[in-house]
Amino acid sequence: EAGVTQSPTHLIKTRGQQATLRCSPISGHTSVYWYQQALGLGLQFLLWYDEGEERNRGNFPPRFSGRQFPNYSSELNVNALELEDSALYLCASSLVDPSTDTQYFGPGTRLTVL
Amino acid sequence: AQKVTQAQTEISVVEKEDVTLDCVYETRDTTYYLFWYKQPPSGELVFLIRRNSFDEQNEISGRYSWNFQKSTSSFNFTITASQVVDSAVYFCALSEAWTGANNLFFGTGTRLTVIP
């Protein structure tokens, strides 16, 4: 069974541009989560989507946004890129019941902002 | 507020030694979930184990074992007879039930280096 997939693997942008990152969940999973792993800041929760709706958001500015498509894949958009947005962005998927469901992660997209 | 502390930033051991990675958590919730993930140099987080707060039974899986103690709010991870392939960053994480938020709160990770 295929795991969580993310594209692209690497992304290089310049300050002020927009970045779009993509994630495909494990088949059957309806929830998608985005996390940022920036140097020195650890792993921080960004967004949670389930059944096409944004369910929860971490402490990030509005220029971090996303969506979930009917096939449960997801996009993370980062507008007006800043140098500190350089990080590894990890996507995870799960079924929706936290009492039983575990988040499984993809390989990540490494975003570099110059 | 929730918090996960991994006090050991880096650990180095010689191959075949045993090593324990510490994790201490804080939560006000009575129902919560604890996790360990492994992050090899490739970057992907690999799920290792999940523990629910109402299940304090310790677990062993091959060379890996986990010790969950609610009395000390700890969820420690031991690797027996370490191998070079165990070299990675290990993260402990917490998820709370009451918020319905589902997101994971991660510790800062422990970088384990196994020297051949």
Image (cartoon, rainbow, N blue to C red):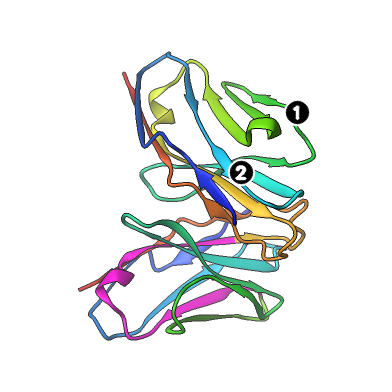
Q: Chain of mark 2?
A: B
* Residue at the spot 51% in from the left edge and 77% down from the top edge: A75
- Image location of residue A25, percent across then percent down: 61, 64
Q: Is residue A81 magenta?
A: yes
Can you say whether A33 is above or below A61 in the image?
Answer: above
Check the image and report above or below for A1 versus B21: below
The quarter of the picture where residue A82 lies is: bottom left
Q: Which residues are magenta?
A: A72-92
The residue where tag 2 is placed is B35
Q: Is residue A74 magenta?
A: yes
- Tag 1's secondary structure? loop
Which mark sits nearer the N-terminus, 2 or 1?
2
Q: Tell me the distance, in whole angstroms, between the alpha carbons under discs 2 and 1.
A: 14 Å
Quarter of the picture holding the C terminus of chain A: bottom left
Residue B109 can be seen, yes or no: yes
**Where does the image place residue B36, in percent across and percent down from the top left?**
57, 40
| Image coordinates for residue B80, horizontal then vertical, percent | 52, 17
**Amino acid type, label 1:** Gln
Q: Give the residue at the far left of this rendering.
A: A114
Secondary element under disc 2, as helix, strand or loop, is: strand
Q: Residue at x 34, y 84 (%)?
A: A18
Q: Amino acid at mark 2?
A: Phe
The dot on residue B57 is 1
